[in-house]
Structure formats: structure tokens, C-alpha cells
Amino acid sequence: MTDERSTAARIQDPGIRALYKLENRWQAWLDVEVALARAQAELGIIPKEAVEPIARAAKLESMDRKRIDEAFARTAHTIVPLVWELSRCVGEPHGGWVHWGATTQNITQTGDLLVLRQAHQKFLGLIHDALEAMADLAERGADMPIPGRTHGQHAVPATFGYKVAVWVDEMLRHVDRFRDAAPRLFVAMLGGGAGTFASLGEQGPAVQAGIAKHLNMGVMQVPSRVIGDHLAENICILGMLAATCGKIGRELYTQMKTEYGEVEEPVPPGTVGSSTMPQKRNPKLCQDIVAAAMEIRSIVPFALESMQTEHEADRTTSLTFDAAEARACIITGDMLARLVSVLQGLKLNPARMRKNLDLSGGLIVAEAVMLELGQTIGRQTAHDVVYDAAQASLIEGKSFAAALMEDKRVSARLSKAEIDKLLDPTAYTGLCSQMAREAAQRARGAATAWRAH
């Protein structure tokens, strides 16, 4: 989401942009270099005395940034200038042990996964904030009748809380996806130039395992530089999360339309909706969410294309994966921050929901009449009878109740009082209230567990 687009909402930056600043990535790479040195010293590959000098020197703020920038300008290499500066800062006699047996992607990919792990923690925090807000909404709207709509038309009555229960159900599965993917995603790589362990030989897997231990990560069983399915899986998960958030944003956007008037996103005092129409209270946050979700989903095929790496390494797809991950993560943070704000401040208009529910004059509960009538004349015959009455109501402009009573197949079996009772939409919301309260309990439980962890 561009800065220009995001100015529509007064939302606190969730901090993902800071994670993807070059300096933070560099520090993550330096952290991997330290883990590499520790793992190799434990195996006797480099002197144990080299570890602490390397660890002390591997702080970006203590390095000469001018030297690093000049070396980058000269070499155009991703990490060599950083390695040179780290070696210089370590000094003799241990500076020569920096980056021993590793190749660039070993360090950068592992380091970038450290950054991504930080991003995931922020995402999960925001998702649980959203779940907590959804729990409140589900409870508030559990018994709040609203038209259930299918194909854009009134179908059967529902409650607003039921809508939220659907969102909760999907969101909880996204939490599961993040957690299930973590062991596959957060893995250290140290296979050397072509992923063959040639530079470290038999000790290679042990060094990789040591790095993983010091970084609290898993390991790649085959540390090939062309393996990217775990990186693509992450972006696919972000795409699915975006699809859910976009759906919520679009639903609320629709419900905010003047003709619906069922909800309203928070509109802080002083917010201007239009430069020329003073009355406008536009769904800016929901539009931000929908737009961000579209952009994230568009990155998914880009990530899948980035799996098409040839031979044993190809910088092309390293660049595209880096771009896909950073962009998807930054926009996901923006999207989730806006979703939380909307859910926490959403205004509900139950009077308008009820008014909309009554627009069809009882047609929305035609199914209830059909099922009651079907007990005496059979389900299919009852469907035909109620269909005829519904069409007469719509075409001739008469009330549904009157059309039903005029049909002797109905009036012979149901009294006017019975029909009026069947046409009460609030009595035909099924288990919406129950599902809403159960979803609220699950959402609140997940949020509580997250905060406790």
C-alpha cells in the first residue's frame, strides 16, 4: 500500500516497514555470521578464541557505514562488503575466520528468515487483536437479525453475529496455517556454493545444525539454493489471509452503502470524505483493506514463478523472492492494522438491519412456510404452492401473507395467525446466535492464549 493511499486512515504503523529496512536485514545477516562462527568453533573448524571477537564486532552500529557503502558501490555484491567490514572490525588474528565455508545465499536467506519470523510475530499479534474485536462483535450481534443474502438477494434471515462467526472461523485457520508452516519455513541453510556441503565436507550438516540451534531454527535436509517452496508457501498463506481480510472489508463496504446503512466503520471527528461533497462519510479503511488484499494476492503468482530456479542457483529468483516477501509482508501489516481498527470501532445499526429484513414483506421466510405446509402436503407440492404465492406477491404487488391466504391449498391448512407467526423473520434465524457465541468464545480463547504465551 502506497503512502499516498494509506494517508486515508489514521492508523499506527505496525512496524513491518522497519523490519525490512536494509539496516535491519544487514543486522540479521550479521547475526547469522555469529551463529556460523559459534557452530564452527564448537566443532573445532575455527578457533574457539575467534567467536567472541566476531560476536562483539557483528553490530552494524559500530561499523564504518561509509566504508560499507563505498564497497557496495564498487563491488555491486550483496554481502561481500559487509563481510569485509566485519572481518576488519574483528581484526587480527581472528578476522580471517569470518564467513568460513559459507556462500552469500546461505547467510542472506537464513537472515531474511529471521526478519520474516519477526514479521510473523507481528502478524499473529494483529490477527489476535482482530479476533478479540471479532469476539466482541459476534456477541453484540449474536441476536441482531439481518437479511441473509445469497447471490445478492435476500435468502433467509440470519444475524450479524453469524457473519462475524464466519470471519472468526477463517481467521483461526489462518493462525493454524502460520503455526503449521513455521517448522518448514524457518530453517537455516548452509550447503555452500552449490548446496553440496563441499566446503565443509562431513561436518557440513553438523555446522548447519549448529547454526540452527543458535538461531532457534530448523535445518534444510537438502540445503539447495534452488529450493523455494517454503518461501512460496509463506506468500501463499499471506495471500489466503488477504483473501479473508478483503472479503471482510468488501462485506462491510457494502453494508455501509447508503441503501444498506447497516454498519459504519469508525470515522474520527474531522475526517473529510470529499473535497466537494461535504456530506460524505466514505469507507476509507475498508477500501484500504480491499485494495491491500488485492495487491497481496497479486504477489502469489509472482512467488510461485520464483520457484522456477535453474540448475543449482540463480540470482534472478533470489531477487524476486526478496521483493515478493518484503512487499507482501509490508502490505499485510498495513492491511491487518486497518482491519483491527475497523473491527474495534465498527458501529452497528440494528434498526436499519431490521428495516432491511422487512423489505420483502415476509418473502425472506418463504422457506419456513414451505416446510410447515410440507408436513401435510409434501415438500415438493408445498414448494410449488409457496412459489406461486411468492411470484404473485412480487408480480402483482400484494403482500405475501395475502397471497398465501388467497390460495385455498394454504388457507385450508394454515390460519392467518399461523401464517403471521411463520412470517416473523426473527423466529427463523436457525442456530445463528449459538454459532456466534461459540465463535466469540473460540476467538477470545485464542487471543487470551496468545497474550499468555
Image: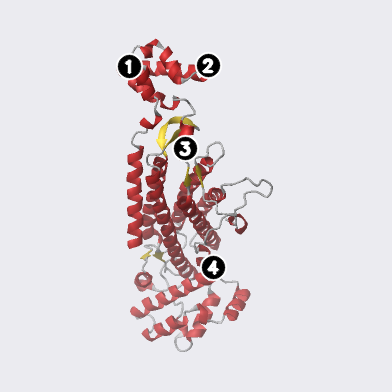
Q: Is residue 38 above or below residue 1?
A: below
What x and y, as percent, mark residue 416? Answer: 37, 17
Rounded to the nearest whole Å, what is the CA distance between mark 4 and mark 3?
48 Å
Rounded to the nearest whole Å, what is the CA distance between mark 3 and mark 1?
37 Å
Q: Nearer the viewer, residue 73 or 146?
A: 146
**Residue extending furthest toward the bottom:** 92
Q: Nearer the viewer, residue 75 or 6?
A: 6
Q: Amino acid at mark 3?
A: Ala
Looking at marks 2 and 4 on the same chain, the residue that comes earlier in the sequence is marked by 4
Q: Nearer the viewer, residue 161 or 88?
A: 161
Q: Amino acid at mark 1?
A: Gly
Query: Within 10 Å of the Cα at label 1, are there few (<14), some (14-19), or many (20+) other Cα atoms?
Result: few
Rounded to the nearest whole Å, what is the CA distance between mark 2 and mark 4?
66 Å
Image quarter of the C terminus: bottom left
Q: Nearer the viewer, mark 4 or mark 1?
A: 1
Residue ID for mark 4: 21
Image quarter of the N terminus: bottom right
Query: Within 10 Å of the Cα at label 3, are there few (<14), some (14-19), or many (20+) other Cα atoms?
Result: some
Q: Nearer the viewer, mark 4 or mark 3?
A: 3
Query: Within 10 Å of the Cα at label 2, are there few (<14), some (14-19), or many (20+) other Cα atoms?
Result: few
Residues marked 3 and 1 touching at CB (< 8 Å): no
Q: Residue at x 37, y 39 (%)?
A: 143
Residue ID for mark 3: 351
Residues marked 2 and 3 touching at CB (< 8 Å): no
Q: Nearer the viewer, residue 281 or 299?
A: 281
Q: Amino acid at mark 2?
A: Glu
Looking at marks 3 and 1 on the same chain, the residue that comes earlier in the sequence is marked by 3
What x and y, as percent, mark residue 155? Answer: 44, 30
Mark 4: which secondary structure?
A: loop
Residue ID for mark 2: 396
Residues marked 4 and 3 touching at CB (< 8 Å): no
